[in-house]
Amino acid sequence: MARVDINRFGEMDVFVRVVDLGGFSAAARALRMTPSAVSKLIARLEARLGARLINRSTRKLQLTPEGTAFYDRSLSILADLEEAERDAAAGAAPRGYLRVNTSVPFGMHYLIPLLPGFLARHPEVTVDVTLTDKVVDLLEDRADIAIRVGPLRSSQLVARKLRESRMVLVAAPSYLAKHGAPRHPDDLTRHNLLGFGFARQSNGWPFKDEHGNVTAVVPTGNALVSDGESMRLLVLSGLGISRLSMFHIGPDIEAGRLVPVLESHNPGDTESIHAVYVGGGHLPARVRAFLDYLVETVDPA
């Protein structure tokens, strides 16, 4: 019997990523490799096959006829391998590598504290957690589960709701002592309103007037940040006012470190927190166990 080279599946995976993502650098980022390592792997693959698969130029990559045929067969083989693994794992005890992508606030205040309990229950699982407030592509990032806060974009992902959380405008007592507390949304023009440096679903902070009509105020402060935890720290420092979710800052309000502002004008809108994953077929036991653990342990209030 011919020797089975277990690296062939890895070569196929890297080759498919290069084609799907349009370049060595993009594939290297997704696979957590260096661009030179990806380039060398493709070169070795071509040498072993005795055929050029990709024509390289400074602007783009183009598949040769042999590359197109190999790409199509690789997609089919990798899909069969993934299905075989899912089928095998569905009836087995949770084990293996689990990649989780989560927002920074949820990761720091909820997910990381929950991990010891999950790993004690499932000691054969290894969890790889990435914290970012950017929305990631699960397939490109090779994540099994992502925790997303706020409205879900239309996609083919499956979502399990973990909790709902009210939005609150807050400031530190030190900021309010220095600048005064706004009594009406119109007063916010005289305050430092801290926002985020990435695109948000909403165009501004909503406020209701005396008649129940809702208008929006766009934050225009002197600092922008990329994640909710950095925003929380800025507000705690007394730099300005911001709007954050109660799941994130509830303990700060209870301890008096932050003070709700303009609550009489709060429209009561909420943020939903979901665990999302790629559906279809059988879920690996490690993925299903982690989803069930999140639903069990995250307070839905």
Image (cartoon, rainbow, N blue to C red):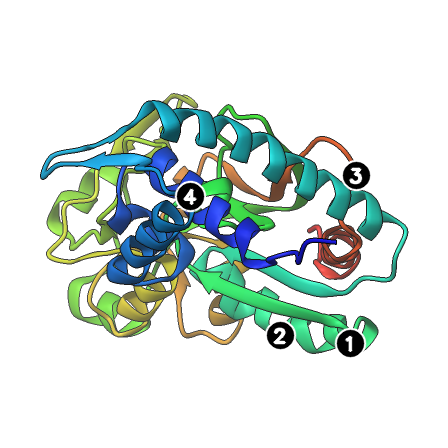
The reply to whether discs 1 and 4 touch (Cβ–Cβ < 8 Å) is no
Q: Nearer the viewer, residue 296 or 278?
A: 278
**Residue farthest along the right direction in this orientation:** 91
Q: Nearer the viewer, residue 272 or 218?
A: 272
Using the rendered image of the protein, determine whether residue 155 is visible from the camera's viewpoint: yes
Question: Residue 123, which numbered label?
Answer: 1
Q: Secondary structure at mark 4?
A: helix
* Residue type for callout 3: His
Question: How far separated are the C-alphas under marks 2 and 4?
Answer: 48 Å
Q: Position of residue 109 (x, y in %)?
A: 54, 68
* Residue type for callout 4: Leu
The total number of labels drawn is 4
Q: Which label lies toward us, 2 or 1?
A: 1
Circle 3: is it few (<14), some (14-19), or many (20+) Cα within 10 Å?
some
Q: Nearer the viewer, residue 81 or 150?
A: 81
Query: Residue beneath label 3, please?
Result: 282
Sequence-first tag of 2 and 1: 2
Circle 1: is it few (<14), some (14-19), or many (20+) Cα within 10 Å?
few
Sequence-first tag of 4 and 3: 4
Q: Which label lies toward us, 1 or 4?
A: 4
